[in-house]
Image: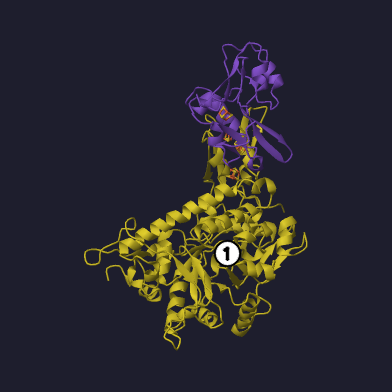
Chain colours: A yellow, B purple
């Protein structure tokens, strides 16, 4: 039997009255959708290959193009949706696991959108951030339990190692290999200019980027790619990756075809060999094992760098975080179920994990209840989309947030969710030199800096409206939040009141 | 003087600059009307081989061969910008022959034409630079003037 035909998802609509046959779309589409027919003298398209990345739409000089969702639909069925049926066809054709990229797109609740922020009226006046100083700086790391003095009465000001951030936002882990050299260069340069951090992910640190070390978090993941002494020493902090929101409980696999040149050198594995990150760390089966790795890394870096442990938000996250807070780690990073990825099995991405808002509230509360909140800073990620999400996360108890998808959007990503094809038309999730070139880090870093500066302004405005002039005063200040359309149980977990209460 | 410079490292070979140039110099206000179903006469051209592409346009040389060679005295330097007076050009194309960059080419009327930095057309600044998606051509003041 032949493969089941699946009608293309998108239609390429070209307004022939506007098209000047410049062939820009043809040259820019790595999926080879467009072509010029010399006999007919017009541009034609093969929509079966279109992934709706909108590169052609963005560059067409006469705005002659649009990509629309095809309305060729299977017979309607509330139980068997068009997509579900097509997934069955695809699997019957291929016999394989379905793969997806970027974050979970399913219509599960987004709690950020059901939380509203307070503002001051009458009795405690709002503050105008353009006229008065506003502090957005945060320090991540273990905080002392109490004020300590020497016998002479002098204050002891020595602190465990901290990361200083000019605003409570960092670019989260994306490895060199999953994203391009130019994407990394853009992130590194922007983080340095902004006074925040970016994260190498598990692909090692390219030798060209050691100069951005003070603004770099280096990752130690289950594959241990590219980990060596200089790598650890170059960084502002070391992150142990236990899990990732997009695929909790799943390892990674960068095919050998992508392990070439610099990537193979940076990962310290031979060219052409598959880069397999096992699902577990094979030396970690308990909090005690984790503690050993934390202390090996601290030992290797002379106790000068905070150690972060990154976990996916899963059912027992509060208990897991409580264990981690006792493992000697300085920072816990929690990644919610909407976090992005370069490639994940679709079923895992769309069905495993829990929302970051609930995980954050539960963890912050648990650590407070157990009196160990000062042991660690909390960083959350997994779809923080705007300055408002940042403010809500901080008010729920986060010390800082990780953003990746928003950063990629600033670099040009159009969320076509086909990173795993390796043919990113925007030069981000690809290693093909002609495509990587499309992302000029001069432009990329400027756009990232613009985005973060815009968020910083908005964070200050939201804080000012609440009458708060320092982000430290907002942290865990859940009285500043109200829920709308949430059940009593959801409100209880979030630790907030309903609007009107 | 500000000139158009090329960063070939970032050129994608998309040819947008050629179309933006042709439009800017067409005297029309709509790109479709200006360029649809017609041959185009851009003043910037993409040179390409397998894995390298870059845009070439007039360098506005300090001591330009085209000015020296023009038999009709149609090419002159005005405030550093090398310009061709179309009404004087006799179409002998000696300038095309002598320009070491290949930056002069015959235009639609047969008279030679070349980049004049868009200073007098509807764009007012180099259209190629303005429309380049990847900063592969820039318009700036640099020291190393020839
Ligand atoms: S894949 Fe992207 S560039 Fe190609 S036709 Fe579709 S939207 Fe355009
Ligand atoms: S980029 Fe636009 S104008 Fe150019 S060929 Fe494609 S559709 Fe036509
Ligand atoms: S517009 Fe820019 S990137 Fe495109 S061909 Fe011209 S110089 Fe190169
Ligand atoms: S400056 Fe203007 S005339 Fe010169 S090449 Fe660029 S677009 Fe064409």
Q: Secondary structure at mark 1?
A: helix
Label count reads 1
* Residue located 49% across and 29% down the image: B124
* Residue located 45% across and 83% down the image: A145
Image spot of residue A493 (x, y percent): 40, 75
Between residue B79 and residue A82, name the one nearer to us.
B79
Image spot of residue B58 (x, y percent): 62, 27
Residue at image mark 1: A214
Q: Is residue A219 left or right of residue A453?
A: right
- A140 is higher (above) or lower (below) than B81: below
Can you tell which quarter of the image residue A123 is in? Answer: bottom left
Image spot of residue A236 (x, y percent): 57, 68
User: Extreme bottom residue here?
Assistant: A151
- A25 is higher (above) or lower (below) than A272: above
Image spot of residue A160 (x, y percent): 52, 77
Between residue A370 and residue B140, name the one nearer to us.
B140
* Residue located 66% across and 62% down the image: A205
The answer to whether one can see residue A33 in this image is no
The answer to whether one can see residue A189 in this image is yes
Subunit ID for the residue under disc 1: A
* Circle 1 residues within 10 Å: few <14, some 14–19, many ≥20: many
Between residue A472 and residue B23, name the one nearer to us.
A472
Quadrant of the rendering where the N terminus of chain B is positioned: top right
* Residue located 68% across and 20% down the image: B96
Q: Quadrant of ligand 3?
A: top right
Q: Is mark 1 within 8 Å of ligand 3?
A: no
Q: Is residue B84 left or right of residue A400?
A: right
- B97 is higher (above) or lower (below) than A97: above
Quadrant of the rendering where the C terminus of chain B is positioned: top right
User: Extreme left residue here?
Assistant: A122
């Amino acid at each position: 039997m032949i493969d089941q035909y699946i009608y293309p998802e998108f239609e390429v609509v070209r307004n022939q009255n506007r098209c000047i046959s410049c062939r820009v779309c043809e040259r820019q589409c790595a999926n080879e959708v467009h072509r010029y027919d010399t006999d007919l003298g017009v541009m034609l398209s093969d929509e079966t290959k279109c992934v709706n990345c909108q590169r052609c739409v963005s560059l067409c000089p006469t705005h002659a193009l649009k990509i629309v969702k095809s309305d060729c639909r299977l017979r309607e069925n509330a139980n068997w949706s068009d997509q579900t049926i097509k997934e069955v066809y695809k699997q019957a054709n291929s016999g394989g696991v379905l793969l997806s990229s970027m974050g979970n797109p399913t219509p599960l609740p987004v709690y950020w959108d059901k939380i509203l922020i307070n503002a001051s009226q009458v009795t405690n006046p709002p503050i105008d951030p353009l006229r008065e100083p506003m502090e957005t700086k945060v320090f991540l790391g273990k905080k002392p339990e109490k004020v300590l003095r020497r016998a002479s009465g002098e204050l002891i000001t020595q602190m465990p190692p901290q990361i200083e951030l000019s605003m409570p936002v960092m670019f989260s882990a994306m490895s060199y290999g999953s994203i391009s050299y130019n994407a990394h260069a853009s992130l590194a340069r922007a983080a340095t200019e902004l006074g925040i951090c970016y994260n190498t992910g598990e692909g090692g640190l390219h030798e060209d980027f050691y100069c951005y070390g003070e603004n770099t978090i280096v990752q130690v993941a289950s594959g241990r790619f590219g980990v060596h002494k200089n790598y650890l020493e170059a960084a502002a902090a070391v992150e142990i990756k236990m899990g990732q929101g997009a695929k909790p409980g799943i390892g990674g696999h960068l095919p050998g075809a992508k392990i070439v040149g610099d990537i193979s050198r940076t990962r310290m594995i031979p060219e052409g060999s598959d880069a397999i990150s096992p699902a577990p760390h094979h030396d970690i089966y308990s909090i005690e094992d984790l503690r050993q790795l934390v202390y090996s890394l601290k030992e290797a870096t002379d106790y000068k760098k905070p150690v972060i442990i990154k976990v996916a938000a899963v059912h027992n996250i509060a208990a897991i975080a409580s264990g981690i807070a006792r493992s000697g780690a300085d920072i816990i990073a929690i990644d919610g179920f909407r976090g992005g990825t370069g490639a994940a099995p679709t079923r895992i991405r769309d069905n495993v994990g829990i929302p970051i808002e609930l995980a954050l509230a539960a963890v912050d509360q648990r650590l407070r209840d157990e009196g160990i909140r000062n042991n660690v800073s909390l960083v959350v990620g997994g779809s923080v989309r705007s300055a408002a999400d940042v403010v809500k996360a901080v008010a729920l108890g986060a010390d800082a947030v990780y953003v990746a998808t928003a950063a990629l959007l600033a670099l040009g990503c159009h969320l076509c969710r086909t990173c795993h094809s390796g043919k990113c038309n925007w030069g981000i999730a690809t290693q093909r030199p002609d495509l990587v070139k499309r992302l000029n880090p001069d432009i990329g870093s400027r756009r990232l800096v613009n985005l973060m500066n815009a968020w910083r302004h908005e964070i200050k405005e939201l804080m000012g409206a609440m009458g708060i002039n320092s982000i430290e005063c907002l942290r865990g200040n859940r009285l500043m939040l109200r829920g709308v359309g949430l059940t009593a149980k959801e409100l209880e977990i979030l630790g907030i009141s309903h609007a009107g209460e | 003087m500000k000139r158009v410079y090329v960063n070939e490292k970032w050129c994608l070979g998309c040819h947008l600059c050629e179309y933006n140039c042709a439009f800017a110099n067409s005297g029309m206000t709509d790109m479709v009307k200006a360029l649809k179903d017609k041959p185009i006469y851009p003043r910037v051209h993409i040179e390409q081989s397998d894995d390298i592409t870059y845009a070439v346009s007039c360098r506005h040389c300090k001591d330009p061969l085209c000015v020296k060679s023009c038999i009709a005295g149609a090419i002159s330097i005005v405030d550093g910008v090398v310009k061709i007076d179309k009404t004087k050009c006799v179409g002998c194309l000696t300038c095309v022959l002598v320009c070491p960059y290949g930056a002069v080419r015959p235009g639609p009327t047969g008279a030679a034409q070349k980049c004049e930095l868009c200073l007098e057309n509807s764009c007012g600044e180099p259209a190629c630079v303005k429309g380049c998606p990847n900063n592969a051509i820039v318009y700036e003041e640099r020291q190393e003037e020839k």
